[in-house]
Image: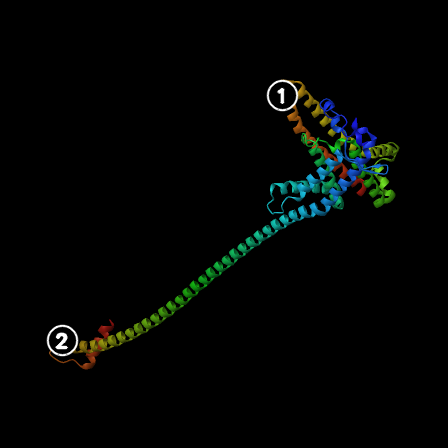
Amino acid sequence: MPQLIVADFLPQLIWLAITFGALYYIISRLAIPKIGSAIEQRHGRIAADIAEASRLKEDTEKAIETYEAALAEARANAHAIVSENRAQMTAEINKEAAALDERLSKQLAEAEVSIAKTRDAAMAQVTGIAQDTTEAIVTELLGKKPTKAAVSSAVSSAAKG
Amino acid sequence: MASNTSQGSEGGLALDPMHQFEISRIIPIKFGSIDASFTNSSLWMVLTVIAVSALLLLGSKRIVPTRLQSVGEMIYEFISNMVRDTMGDEGRKFFPFILTLFCFILGANMLGLFALPVLLHPFTVTSHIIVTFALAALVWVGATVYGFYKHGFGYLKLFAPSGTPPVMLPLLVPIEIISYLSRPVSLSVRLFANMMAGHTMLKVFATFVVALGWAGIVPLAVMVGFTGLEVLIAFLQAFVFAILSCMYINDALHPSH
């Protein structure tokens, strides 16, 4: 077996030491920094991209939030304006209705007063006419003029009856 | 020694499945009595370093990775996760070592499967017990030294797991010590045996392909399937070596398990 030739051991060991040492130097000084930095850079890039993406997402969410807040505020404003207008209009309507009511009732009272006046006047004339008529009828029937006192008492009693 | 270089070429090559594991000295180098010759094993070690470095360094550095960059990053993250899962955050400082170990073994295993006829004889660095044992010993001795350096004699608590009834200790401690001592052996033999067996098998089947003439299509088909399996084993053994190393180092980091 060629593997057991002792004379061949030393050159193999010496060259193993040389080549293994050289490879160790190359790998630890050149290959690991190079490949390690490439991998690091890629991980860094990926992490940065993910961070950027999540930042953008946050921004979007913030924008949506702002939009919704603005929308809610606008809606509340509109509500306030509508209810204020309604209150104002109701107050105006009430005021006008009250004014109208007042005017109408004043006119009504005036009308009633004038009606009462007219009626009183009419009633006063009715008494006169009744007395005159009574006087005329009695004169016609009896041939003689009744006294004023008798006529008025007769009329007022008739009117009461 | 240099005269052995061309020993057993051509003639024995087709028949001896063990020939592929022979060490040949390409450039003989000697410092006194120390033999530091550049062998075919050394050549494949150098090729492994070049291939792994090219794979890890030539990839671009883009946000959206290219194919080559993806492979490098996959290996990086695979080992990175393994180190974190087995050793926690304290094990981070061993990440370069584990990555080197994994890449070196994976590269050597994979390159051993490439046959480049005429130009280069295929050779699998990790099919030699001395290489795998040296790597395993590096891990084991390193972990042991680190364990004693970090915890002093507290590291010996590793041999008496907490919660063990005292009656069991005389039985348990020797078992734990033996299993601890056998770690470098099992670690190195597992890798070496897998690599050697796979390549020997491929070579044996290759011999059949030539010997059987037209009927050689059958062992050829088997070889194609088997090569796929060998790719899996090449990866799996590198993975097993790396994860066991992680666990041994983890024992040095946290001895009371």
**Element on which disc 1 rests:** helix
Nearer to us in this view, A86 or B150? B150
Q: How far across and how far down the image is residue A160, in percent?
A: 25, 73
Which disc is residue B68 wearing?
none
Q: Amino acid at mark 1?
A: Ile
Left or right of B229? Residue A140 is left
The answer to whether residue B217 is seen in the rendering is: yes
Q: Is residue B125 above or below residue A28?
A: above
Q: How far across and how far down the image is residue B152, in percent?
A: 86, 44
Q: How far across and how far down the image is residue A123, in percent?
A: 23, 75
Q: Amino acid at mark 2?
A: Ile
Q: Residue at x 14, y 80 (%)?
A: A145
Question: Could you tell me which chain the residue with mark 2 belongs to?
Answer: A
Question: Could you tell me which chain the residue with mark 1 belongs to?
Answer: B
* Quadrant placement of the N terminus of chain A: top right
Residue count near mark 1 (Cα–Cα under 10 Å), binned few <14, some 14–19, many ≥20? some
Which disc is residue A137 wearing?
2
Q: Is residue A51 above or below residue B183?
A: below
Pointer 1 residue:
B217
Q: Is residue B200 above or below residue B38?
A: above
Left or right of A11? Residue A127 is left
Nearer to us in this view, B76 or A73? B76
